[in-house]
Image (tube, grey):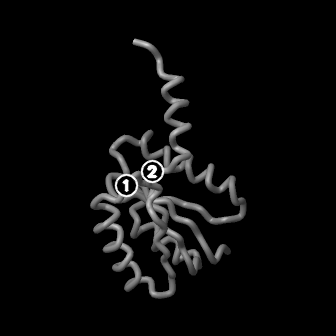
Amino acid sequence: MCKEAVLLVGHGSRLQEANDSLGRLVSLVTGKRPGTKVTYAFMQFASPSLPAALDELAGAGVEQVTVVPIFLYAGVHIREDLPQILAEAAEKLPDLRMILAPVLGIDERMAEIVWERVDAAPNF
């Protein structure tokens, strides 16, 4: 049983293939630190919801979860919704320590990916 976990939180979409991307990211993140419990949740439109994922982790005996918002900027979900959900979960799950990581945000390393996408873009 893992005592610690990482929970990637995405926005969620009505399109399943969009939501599947977060699952692929979980696999990539797990590959960087094998043995670490990494899972995901969504803010809306998809399952599992953030409260449901936190309940599941607590039920599995996880004692500490680091919540990583997979967002480029701190909009309403990050500034308002996420803290509210975590506060409600803290009351419901007092034995689960929740740490909120900063949003992914804009990072210099993303510039290389942008240029890779530009180079790969088809001509019209």
Crowd class of label 1 (few under 14; some 14 to 19; many from 20; radius 10 Å): some
Tell me the residue at 58%/77% (across/down): 62
State the image coordinates of residue 74 (x, y, percent, origin top left): 35, 59
Position of the N terminus by quadrant: bottom right
80 to the left or right of 66 = left
**How many numbered marks, from 0 up?**
2
Between the residue at mark 2 and the residue at mark 1, the CA separation in whole angstroms equals 7 Å
Are the two marked residues, 2 and 1, in contact with CB atoms closer than 8 angstroms? yes
Looking at the rendered structure, which numbered label has been put on residue 34? none
| Nearest to the observer: residue 70 or residue 58 | 70
SS at mark 2 in the image: loop
Looking at the rendered structure, which numbered label has been put on residue 73? 1
Q: Residue furthest top?
A: 124
Q: What residue type is labelled 2?
A: Ile
| Nearest to the observer: residue 8 or residue 47 | 8
State the image coordinates of residue 113 (x, y, percent, origin top left): 54, 37
| Nearest to the observer: residue 97 or residue 45 | 97
Q: Label 2: which residue?
A: 106
Q: In this view, does 123 lie above or below 121?
A: above
Q: In this view, does 76 lie above or below 88?
A: above
Position of the C terminus by quadrant: top left
Q: Quadrant of residue 123?
A: top left
Q: Which amino acid does label 1 sit on?
A: Tyr
Of the numbered discs 2 and 1, the one sitting upstream in the chain is 1
State the image coordinates of residue 28 (x, y, percent, origin top left): 62, 49
Tell me the residue at 51%/86% (across/down): 95
Crowd class of label 2 (few under 14; some 14 to 19; many from 20; radius 10 Å): few
State the image coordinates of residue 98 (x, y, percent, origin top left): 48, 77
